[in-house]
Amino acid sequence: MITVLVADDQAMIRAGFAALLSAQPDLQVLGEARDGLEAVAAARELRPDVVLMDVRMPNLDGLEATRRIMGTGRQTKVLILTTFDVDDYVYAALRGGASGFLLKDAPPEDLITAVRVVAGGEALLAPSVTRRLIEEFTSRRPLDEAESLRLNTLTGRERDVLRLVAAGLANAEIAGELTIAEETVKSHVGRIFTKLRLRDRAQAVVFAYESGLVVPGAPSPGARRSPRLRS
């Protein structure tokens, strides 16, 4: 059973998400929160697997609430909910440890899938949106020299894998691109996360752009594939 906390300042949205998720046999909504402070307190008390976190809330916004929840060291994952697909808050939340984001007007089945994907330990990446979001904000920022130096800890093959992760490719697709076994890709991804101290693929995508490994506006290695929701 996957346990969920719904945090949103609008009662109708909270109720709608809670009803949708509770109708699934493998999902259980433990509680609801009206603002960021309530979300942090409820996450600490209830220890849900996933928090659905609205970005803009009173008292404490979803960004700071995400940081505080991630700072507890527990295994709770945060899935950001937003009405805007290009948003300063969303980008900062991904950097702060959120496992992905989803638009509030996404189809119900996408929300259900998102909760399951994030609870399973993967990042939720919708390549057509996530890549555009990250490119939008990294293009405004100077190259992070400290992040660039961390790239030196990776082997050439690990850099190749990270580029493809940043393009939104799943492990099986990366294996096809590089003509290696999928298990080998999983090993590379695990080592990349360990060396760079990354939580998941969402943070890996952000790092790839901020370090300069992937340049905003450059053709994506996975561009020929049609974007879809994937982990």
Image (cartoon, grey):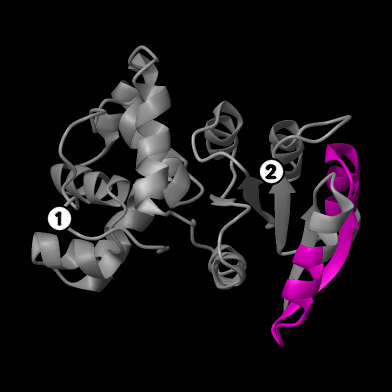
| Residue 76 horizontal side relative to residue 230, left or right | right
Is 171 rendered above or below residue 190? below
Q: Residue at x 39, y 15 (%)?
A: 140
Residue 36 is covered by the magenta coloring = yes
Instruction: Tell me where the magenta segment starts and ends, as one range.
Output: 16-44
**Do the residues bearing badges 2 and 1 touch, measured as CB atoms within 8 Å?**
no
| Whole-percent x, y for residue 156 in the image | 14, 42
Q: Which residue is mark 2?
A: 70
Q: In which quadrant of the rendered image does the N terminus lie?
A: bottom right
Is 93 rendered above or below residue 45? above
Is the residue marked by circle 1 packed among few (<14), some (14-19), or many (20+) residues within 10 Å? few
Residue 73 is covered by the magenta coloring = no
| Residue 155 horizontal side relative to residue 191, left or right | left
Q: Residue at x 59, y 71 (%)?
A: 116
| Residue 158 horizontal side relative to residue 206, left or right | left
**Alpha carbon distance from label 2 to label 1:** 35 Å
Is the residue marked by circle 2 packed among few (<14), some (14-19), or many (20+) residues within 10 Å? some
| Residue 189 horizontal side relative to residue 76, left or right | left
Is 70 rendered above or below residue 1? above
Q: Which numbered disc flags the more N-terminal residue, 2 or 1?
A: 2
Mark closer to the observer (2, 1) = 1
User: Which residue type does callout 2 highlight?
Assistant: Met
Image quarter of residue 72:
top right
Visible residue check, residue 46: yes
Q: Secondary structure at mark 2?
A: helix
Q: Which residue is mark 1?
A: 224
Q: Secondary structure at mark 1?
A: loop
| Whole-percent x, y for residue 84 in the image | 56, 39
